[in-house]
Image (cartoon, rainbow, N blue to C red):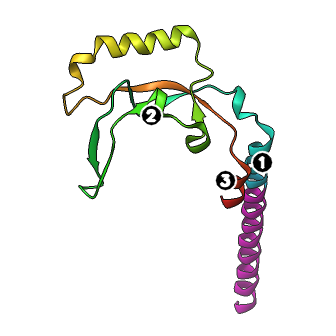
Amino acid sequence: HIKNNYKIMKIKFKLKHKRLYVLLVSFIIIVIINGSMLYMIDANSVKQSGYHQGLWNKQQTEISFWGLFERNKYVLIDDVVKERDFYDFHCLDKAEIDEMNKYFEDNKDKFDDDDFKGLKWYNLCPVGLSDEWVINF
C-alpha cells in the first residue's frame, strides 16, 4: 500500500515539473518575441490613438499625488520635445490638426473649470527610442 502511494506521488511530482518547464519555455519565448519587436518595428511609421494627458493650447498647473507635487495639467503641442518625450505630432494630417483646433475653439470657455481635462483622446506619433534609453531599460 505504501509503495503504491509513493508511485502516485512520483507521478504527480513529474507532472508538476513538466508544467513548470512548459511555463518557463513559454515565458522565454514571449520575452524573446516582445524584446525583438523593439528592434524590428519602426516607430516612426506608427500613429498611436489613445487616451492621454489632456492636450490644450494653453497651460495651467495642477496639484498631483495628494498635494505633494505640482505639474502641468496639459500637453502643449509646441512644448513636446521628441528627444525627451519619445513622441511628437509629425504624422498628423491637416484634417486632424484642424479637428484639434476646432475642439480648442469650441471649448475655450471651459478652460478655467477645474473639472475640464482638455482633449484626452488624440493621436500622437511615437519616435524611435534612443540607444541610451534601451540600454538603461
Image quadrant occupied by the N terminus:
bottom right
Residue 68 screen position, x and y as percent: 27, 58
Measured in 3D between alpha carbons, the distance from the residue under mark 1 to the one under mark 3, in whole angstroms, is 19 Å
Tell me whether circle 3 and circle 2 mark residues in contact (CB < 8 Å).
no
In the picture provided, is 87 more to the left or to the right than 60? right
Task: Please tell me in which quadrant of the rendered image residue 59 appears.
Answer: top left
Magenta region, residue range: 1-28
* Residue at the disc numbered 2: 52
* Residue at the disc numbered 1: 33
As rendered, which of 63 and 122 lies closer to the eye? 63
Residue 60 screen position, x and y as percent: 29, 35
* Residue at the disc numbered 3: 133
* Residue at position x 76%, y 61% in the image: 22
Estimate how packed mark 1 is, as few (under 14), some (14 to 19) or many (20 or more) residues with alpha carbons within 10 Å.
Answer: few
Q: Is residue 11 magenta?
A: yes
Estimate how packed mark 3 is, as few (under 14), some (14 to 19) or many (20 or more) residues with alpha carbons within 10 Å.
Answer: few
Q: What amino acid is found at the position of numbered circle 1 in the picture?
A: Ile
